[in-house]
Image (cartoon, helix red, strand yellow):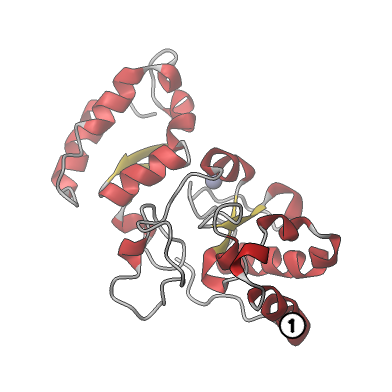
Amino acid sequence: MIETPIDYNEEDQAVVSAFEALAPEEQDGSFWSDLALNELKSRVKAYYITAQNTRCCYCDRHLGSTNHGVWNTEHVASRASHPRFMFKPTNLAASCPDCNINKGVKEVLTTPNRKTYPKTSSPRTSSAFLIIHPHFDRYEDHIHRINMVYLPKSKKGKKTIFVCDLLRFAQNFIDWENSAADTSFEEEVDTVFDEEPTVSQAAVDAVIAKLPIK
Ligand SMILES: [Zn+2]
């Protein structure tokens, strides 16, 4: 969980303020690719790589590198569909490229047409998002991870596993043939989860006991 969002320097804040002053129909997520933003983007990525202790915000893998080439800057609410939140410090994080690509533009807001970004101080902030939010949620409250096998502990955990395709690693750590493509693995994972908002540690442990995790 990220403790403190980035605080833009004066130069970057001027760019952000100018963008956020535009009329909604003039705010375009493709502005992120403007060459003029290269230094701002580099500072954002460097900040979150360090703030996250070089762990991907979705798969929780410790990438162990600060090289920008092995990281993507992540917009929790996609900049393509929600350009108004493109520069919100709490909408930004660092992820591995595979999680970022799998997540793509999938909707993660509970109310997609909301106009303002949820405030950190609000008790309902976490529930404004369908997936684990790097700034607002504790990863371990929602996903139980053993090696690279991911088990949901909550609806958010399950949605995060789906949105970022965290079952993609299963083949290497579940000891049965072609496990990543084997739907029986997903069925086993599903058994840990019912319509309750959270599942007990005992239920998670019961599934773990059945899985041949290396
Ligand atoms: Zn990842």
Which quadrant of the view contains residue 45?
bottom right
Identify which residue is drawn at 66% across, 52% down.
72
- Of residue 185 and residue 109, the one placed in the foreground of this image is 109
Q: Is residue 211 visible?
A: no
Which quadrant of the view contains residue 211?
top left
In the image, is residue 5 above or below residue 214? below
- Of residue 105 and residue 70, the one placed in the foreground of this image is 105
Q: Residue furthest top?
A: 177
Q: Which residue is mark 1?
A: 14
Q: Residue furthest bottom?
A: 10
What crowding class fits label 1: few (fewer than 14 Cα within 10 Å), some (14-19), or many (20 or more)?
few
In the image, is residue 85 above or below residue 211? below
Location of the N terminus (image quadrant): bottom left
Residue 115 shown left or right of residue 46 in the figure: left
Identify which residue is drawn at 55% across, 75% down.
5
Q: Is residue 74 visible?
A: yes
Identify which residue is drawn at 20% across, 37% down.
192
- Of residue 3 and residue 83, the one placed in the foreground of this image is 83
Q: Position of residue 124 (x, y in %)?
A: 29, 71
Q: Position of residue 194 (x, y in %)?
A: 16, 39
